[in-house]
Image (cartoon, rainbow, N blue to C red):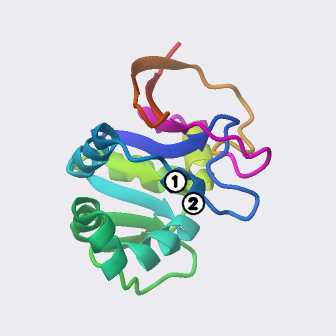
């Protein structure tokens, strides 16, 4: 069965975007060679990416650009060449290469996708998708990059979740730039 992992940037006060859906704060970390190596290594991990439509549109508007290639060539290559899934009710002909549009019940479609052979899947951003798949018990692991910033308001990953979900910390790593990567698995 394919592993489904969430990878998201989050503020100290639990937001993945500000009130205007901006997350530029996640890309304003001080220079840190160890952090840059982590980001490049993470991008080389393989697997497929999964998005909701809003996150997909943001990613598709940036990663195929010369600016992305110049800023982060390893990450840009991975984002552009790797397989991608996007949940959408309206998108029919995606222009970003290697994209498959998914429609229908998010939990049912994801359950089927996880049961098929293939590489693991990583959800980036996509708060609504994360909340729905968390509620359905379909996410195997969560990896959060906690940034040393407080927004005071914004968008969370788990809005609307009715029941609490217990997670078990499996790894943590602090970087000189103040970012901390926390990895959790579902558990008690």
The correct choice, above or below, for 123 with respect to 55 in the image is above
Q: Position of residue 131 (x, y in %)?
A: 62, 45
Numbered range of the magenta stretch: 135-156
Q: Considering depth in this image, is 177 or 140 the residue closer to the camera?
A: 177
Q: Which residue is mark 2?
A: 24
**In front: 38, or 5?**
38
Residue 150 is covered by the magenta coloring: yes
Task: Give neighbour class at mark 1: few <14, some 14-19, many 20+ (Cα, 10 Å).
Answer: few
Name which quarter of the figure residue 162 lies in: top right
Residue shown at 51% from the left, 75% from the top: 57
Q: Please report contact status of discs 2 and 1: CB closer than 8 Å, yes or no.
A: yes
Q: Position of residue 127 (x, y in %)?
A: 61, 52
- Label 1: which residue? 28
Q: Residue furthest top?
A: 188
Picture residue at 46% right of the left edge, 53% below the top: 124
Between residue 25 and residue 115, name the one nearer to us: 25
Secondary structure found at label 1:
loop
């Amino acid at each position: 069965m394919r592993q489904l992992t969430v990878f998201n940037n989050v503020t100290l006060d639990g937001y993945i975007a500000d009130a205007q859906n901006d997350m530029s704060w996640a890309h304003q970390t001080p220079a840190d060679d160890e952090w840059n190596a982590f980001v490049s290594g993470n991008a080389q991990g393989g697997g497929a990416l999964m998005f909701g439509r809003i996150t997909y549109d943001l990613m598709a508007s940036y990663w195929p650009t010369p600016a992305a290639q110049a800023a982060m060539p390893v990450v840009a290559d991975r984002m552009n060449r790797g397989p991608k899934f996007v949940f959408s009710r309206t998108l029919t002909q995606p222009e970003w290469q290697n994209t498959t549009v998914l429609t229908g019940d998010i939990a049912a479609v994801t359950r089927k996708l996880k049961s098929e052979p293939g590489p693991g899947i990583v959800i980036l951003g996509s708060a609504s998708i994360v909340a729905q798949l968390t509620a359905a018990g379909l996410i195997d692991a969560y990896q959060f990059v906690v940034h040393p910033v407080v927004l005071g308001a914004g968008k969370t990953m788990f809005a609307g979740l009715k029941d609490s979900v217990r997670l078990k910390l499996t790894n943590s790593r602090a970087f000189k730039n103040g970012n901390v990567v926390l990895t959790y698995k579902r558990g008690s």
